[in-house]
Image (spheres, coloured by chain):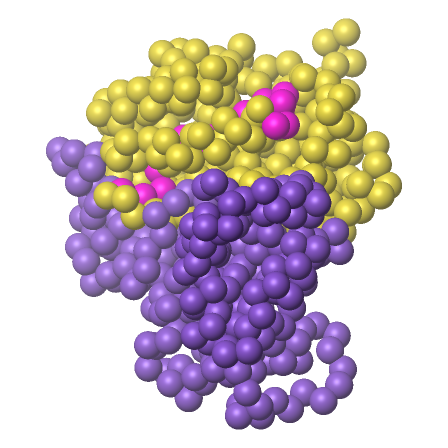
Amino acid sequence: MSPASNRLPFQAGIGLRTPHVNEVLAQCPDVPFFEVHSENYYLDGGPALASLARIRADYPLSLHGVGMSLGSADPLDLSHVEKLRTLIARIEPALVSEHLCWSGIAGRHLNDLFPLPYTDEALALACARVAELQERLGRAVAIENISSYLTFADSTIPEWDFVAALARRTGCKLLLDVNNIYVNATNHGFDADAYVAAIPPDAVAEIHLAGFETANGCLIDTHGAPVAPDVWALYARTIERLGSRPTLIEWDTEIPAFAVLQREAATAQGILEACNAVAA
Amino acid sequence: MQSLREIQRRFVEAVFSPEASIDFVAGSPASARDRTAIYRRTIFTNYHNALSATYPVVKRLTGAPFFHTAVDAFAHAYPSHSGDLNIYGDALGEFLATYPPAADLPYLADVARLEWAIDEAHRASEASCAPESVLAALAIAPPHRLPALRLRLEPSCRLVASPFPILRIWQTNQPGYSGDDRVMLDEGSDAMLIRRGDNGISLERLTAGDHAWLAALAAGGTLGTAIEAAQGADATFDLGVTLREQIAAGTIIAVVDM
């Protein structure tokens, strides 16, 4: 493998999903970087893994995990960590990321991303798990803030302080999902800009953007729609504060034509460049 | 204040049992119930989507509503234990075999087993294969050691057998199939070798003897055990012919345990 680069450019990339892999391989579109879900390549061999290696040869690549369940009171699933370690060795990604969430307990996995109760106990546990993961992988991991539809009665720490404390205590990077901040601010009634202001800028290694849908007054993070106008505005204010960052368009359900994702990425790229122009 | 473990345990309970108390969720009881239900829907939709991708023929045979109801029951009975959703669902065949609503579709469980075998073949590791080296290894083995030898199969190889004509059922339910789609359940049994090659997945029909022989080897049995299994399944089993064929086809890639 002759890796394209080992750093994510400070530009707008695209989350690569299976329906678009062959098109990307055939046409080599001008995309600054791709990101894939790590678990989709927890394979021993076969054509999907071979395709990923070819894409990695031409593009910087980020591995985004959805199944580590870092916030579970259960121990880390070491077989899951080992599969990630194997994939990292194969692909040499520019960035490895996971979610600040839990997905199961007592050995049972629900394969979805659940919020933590934001308590001192959960913070201590999340810090220990992130530190353990970084230790076992021998590299820093970027941790993403998730969207949520409920909060826990026992929570005592604002989500943004919890996220910032995790980065400070473990030295982990943050993957700031601006759509998730907007969704949570709406669902739980807080100020999205105050959230962004609490995040240590140096920790932010990447930004995610996606679309949500609305059901009974609750915003659902479906990754199945264009980025909303309010989220573009929050993204612009976030970039203004942090400076430009590698930014990713995610679309996971009702996946549209690749050109639609390219248009969304072009919008993000325009905001990044406008911010750079002001800074320069 | 409840422990993190207790909150997580109660949340999981609430996902699977809508009547469970959810006083650990903030907000009014009605809103807490609505918000928990969003997670319940997402989780089961995730399972519907994941297993629809793995089991397209089972879904086509039953129709989506039946399939989704079956997946819901399956997810209760056979919880996921991994953060990798791609490897969830291996036991769907086992589940369907005793799922009362599927009693009228006795072949359904075996079709599920076939689709799982195909899924596993997609994910299996690569292996280089040199038939001449396998033949050379056999040639130098002392004759009295032959029954104790083990033969390693190419890693994507999977063996599936059924009393029903599941290969035809599978073929006639592929997207774009246009031919006679009537399958008589008494057409006969099927025994198959599934594997991944340069042109994707292949499904090859085997004699009962060859299937029993390969299945015994795949399970880690010795050549002696495999021959017994083959002869038990098919009195006309010819070891010399099968061995040559399966080595040439790249099914057998190594001789081990010498």
Q: Residue at x 64, y 91 (%)?
A: B182
Compared with B202, A274 (above or below) is: above
The x, y position of residue A58, in whole percent, is 78, 28
| Residue A93 falls within the magenta-colored stretch | yes
Nearest the eye: B209 or B218: B209
Is residue A124 shown to the viewer in this render?
A: yes
Of A204 and B71, the residue lying toward us: B71
Task: Measuring from the top left, give residue B126's x and y in whole percent.
Answer: 63, 42
Please tell me which residue is depicted at 66% across the width and 80% down the height of the picture. Answer: B172
Q: Which residue occupies the foreground of this view, A130 or B3? A: A130
Which residue is at the far top? A280
Q: Is residue B68 visible?
A: no
Q: Is residue B81 above or below residue B206?
A: above
Q: Where is residue B98 shown, x and y percent of the image? A: 33, 77
Chain with colour yellow in the figure: A
Whether residue B71 is in magenta: the answer is no
Residue B103 vs A53, above or below: the answer is below
Q: Residue furthest right?
A: A27
Q: Is residue B108 left or right of residue A255?
A: left
* Of B117 and A69, the residue lying toward us: B117
Which residue occupies 56% across, 41% down?
A44
* Chain B pictured colour: purple
Q: In the picture shown, does residue A117 fall above or below A226?
A: above
Q: Position of residue A144 (x, y in %)?
A: 48, 29
Q: Which residues are magenta?
A: A90-105
Name the residue at 84% across, 43% down: A26
